[in-house]
């Protein structure tokens, strides 16, 4: 019996280590996703700058076309001034010409503003490009670290699982089945130490008789609170 309890005690420690490693392994996908989100965010920002720059250029081309058509219109009015006979018709034409010139001048101002915007946008785009590159570099570097940490944790877990399997394999079949069932149903912790007269898993106080039996280490004891196997710590008095 003492050998069986020793194995269970060893399993308690191995289970705890396996649980810690499994929790560690679960964090890696989230860490990777965070890095991917940071890169995607910078990439979306750069895309917005590109489309703003594109829209600005389109706007300028449109303004330039409008200016050109106003220039043609003005020439047409100018040529008509030679043909009109009446004074009021002539004045009306001059007004038209004046109106066209004013409109064109406004549009030319707008064109200048698109050049200013282009300069500003290209500065912002360059900054966004640098931010994206640095996010990508950081993601690549961190991903390499995460991959290495993950590999190391997986290897440690493999070692723990192998050691665990060895102990489990040497348990009497009934105890093994019991242990496996409790490990499954009690978040990977089937064996608990008795501490201060209570179960280390659910903290239920144990009856005096059970504590005495536990000290003698001659039979398998079960906590009535959580159903886990109870062991008096080998190094405790
Ligand atoms: Zn318990």
Image: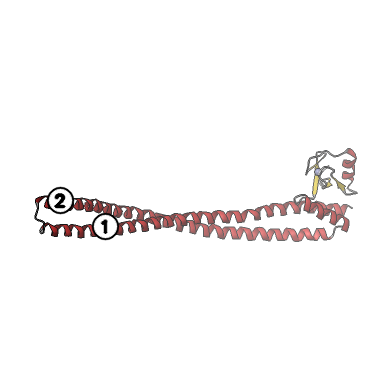
Determine the CA span between mark 2 and mark 1.
22 Å
Residue picked out by circle 1? 66
The image quadrant of residue 196 is top right
In this rendering, is residue 237 above or below 174?
above
Local SS, label 2: helix
x%, y% of residue 213? 90, 44
The image quadrant of residue 146 is bottom right
| Labels in figure, total | 2
Quarter of the picture containing the C terminus is top right
Image check: 63 left or right of 89? right
Local SS, label 1: helix
Question: Residue at image x 30%, y 58%?
Answer: 62
**Between discs 2 and 1, the one toward the N terminus:** 1
Ligand 1's quadrant:
top right
In this rendering, is residue 79 above or below 221?
below
Residue picked out by circle 2? 92
Question: Residue at image x 9%, y 55%?
Answer: 85
x%, y% of residue 119? 32, 54
Colouring of the image: secondary structure
Residue 179: assigned label: none
- Residue closer to the observer: 71 or 220: 71
Image check: 129 left or right of 237? left
Question: Residue at image x 67%, y 52%?
Answer: 23
């Amino acid at each position: 019996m003492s050998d069986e309890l020793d194995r269970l005690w060893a399993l308690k420690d191995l289970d705890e280590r396996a649980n810690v490693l499994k929790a560690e392994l679960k964090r890696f996908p989230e860490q990777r996703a965070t890095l991917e989100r940071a890169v995607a965010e910078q990439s979306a920002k750069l895309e917005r700058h590109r489309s703003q720059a594109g829209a600005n250029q389109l706007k300028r081309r449109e303004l330039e076309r409008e200016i050109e058509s106003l220039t043609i219109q003005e020439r047409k009015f100018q040529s008509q001034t030679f043909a009109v006979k009446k004074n009021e018709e002539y004045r009306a034409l001059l007004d038209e010409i004046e109106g066209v010139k004013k409109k064109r001048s406004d549009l030319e101002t707008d064109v200048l503003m698109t050049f200013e915007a282009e300069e500003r946008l290209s500065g912002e785009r360059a900054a966004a490009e640098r931010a994206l590159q640095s996010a990508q570099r950081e993601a690549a570097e961190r991903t390499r670290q995460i991959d290495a940490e993950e590999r190391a944790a997986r290897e440690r877990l493999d070692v723990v699982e192998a050691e665990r399997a060895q102990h489990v394999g040497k348990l009497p079949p009934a105890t093994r089945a019991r242990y496996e069932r409790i490990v499954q149903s009690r978040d990977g912790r089937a064996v608990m130490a008795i501490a201060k007269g209570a179960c280390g898993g659910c903290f239920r106080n144990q009856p005096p008789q059970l504590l005495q039996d536990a000290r003698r280490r001659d039979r398998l004891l079960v906590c009535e609170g959580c159903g886990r196997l109870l062991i008096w710590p080998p190094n405790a008095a």
